[in-house]
Amino acid sequence: DAGVIQSPRHEVTEMGQEVTLRCKPISGHNSLFWYRQTMMRGLELLIYFNNNVPIDDSGMPEDRFSAKMPNASFSTLKIQPSEPRDSAVYFCASSPHRDPISGANVLTFGAGSRLTVL
Amino acid sequence: SQQGEEDPQALSIQEGENATMNCSYKTSINNLQWYRQNSGRGLVHLILIRSNEREKHSGRLRVTLDTSKKSSSLLITASRAADTASYFCATAFTGGGNKLTFGTGTQLKVEL
């Protein structure tokens, strides 16, 4: 298995431009998570999906952010319009069914998309 | 914030020594996990400990959990230069669904 695949790995854009980050989860995993990592705030959960349905988007910072999961093998995170404070590494992670005893989700992360907004 | 806090923020040791990192959290949890992140990479799952477990081992890793103190520790024995990375605890809070909240991380440097 190729793992969780994210693209692009690096993106440099100018303020006001639209940014689309893509993620292909591991086949058979039914939960997908988008995280953002910055030095100041660490790892923040933005949104997660179960079976392609958004469950909790309370971490999405503003209406400029949107995420979709049109099918089990693809998700996008879109920022429109982008701002310099959106500069961060964005991680996608997927997880199989929860551990029936502990309810745990063990996450497999992609390599991340490093976004720089000038 | 429900975010866990790791202590220390940074740790530098010599190869062969043991490294201990601590994690504290604020609310009741179902389980706690530890992840490693090498520079420029995604996080990698290391070990999971359930709320009814007190200690767990995996190779050179030993994790303890004290739910009364809301804290966990990760011990890496006989450290190697390849263990140089950031280590994060992650908690799934009771009633939090699938949400996994990550701590602030400990940067470990193992020197030859």
Image (cartoon, rainbow, N blue to C red):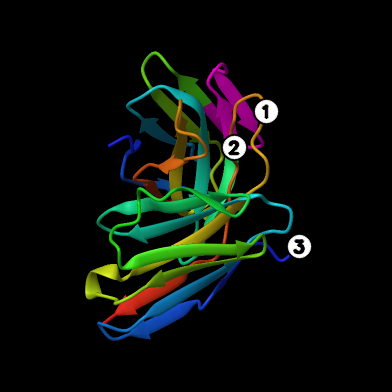
Q: Position of residue A117 (x, y in %)?
A: 29, 79
Q: Chain of mark 2?
A: B
Lower position in the chain sequence, tag 3 or tag 1: 3
* Quadrant, the N terminus of chain A: bottom right
| Amino acid at pointer 1 | Pro
Residue B61 covered by magenta stretch: yes
Q: Residues within 10 Å of mark 2 (few under 14, many from 20)?
A: some
Label 2 secondary element: strand
* Quadrant, the C terminus of chain A: bottom left
Q: With B109 as the anchor, is A52 left or right in this view?
A: right
Which residue lies under the disc numbered 2? Answer: B47
* Residue farthest top in this picture: B68
Which residue lies under the disc numbered 3? Answer: A1
Residue at the spot 55% in from the left edge and 55% down from the top edge: A93
Marks 2, 3: nearer the viewer:
3
Q: Which mark is residue A100?
A: 1
Q: Position of residue B15 (x, y in %)?
A: 50, 48
Q: Residues within 10 Å of mark 1 (few under 14, many from 20)?
A: few
| Amino acid at pointer 3 | Asp
Q: Is residue B18 visible?
A: yes
Marks 1, 2: nearer the viewer:
1
Residue at the spot 42% in from the left edge and 41% down from the top edge: B101
Label 1 secondary element: loop
Q: With B16 as the anchor, is B13 left or right in this view?
A: left
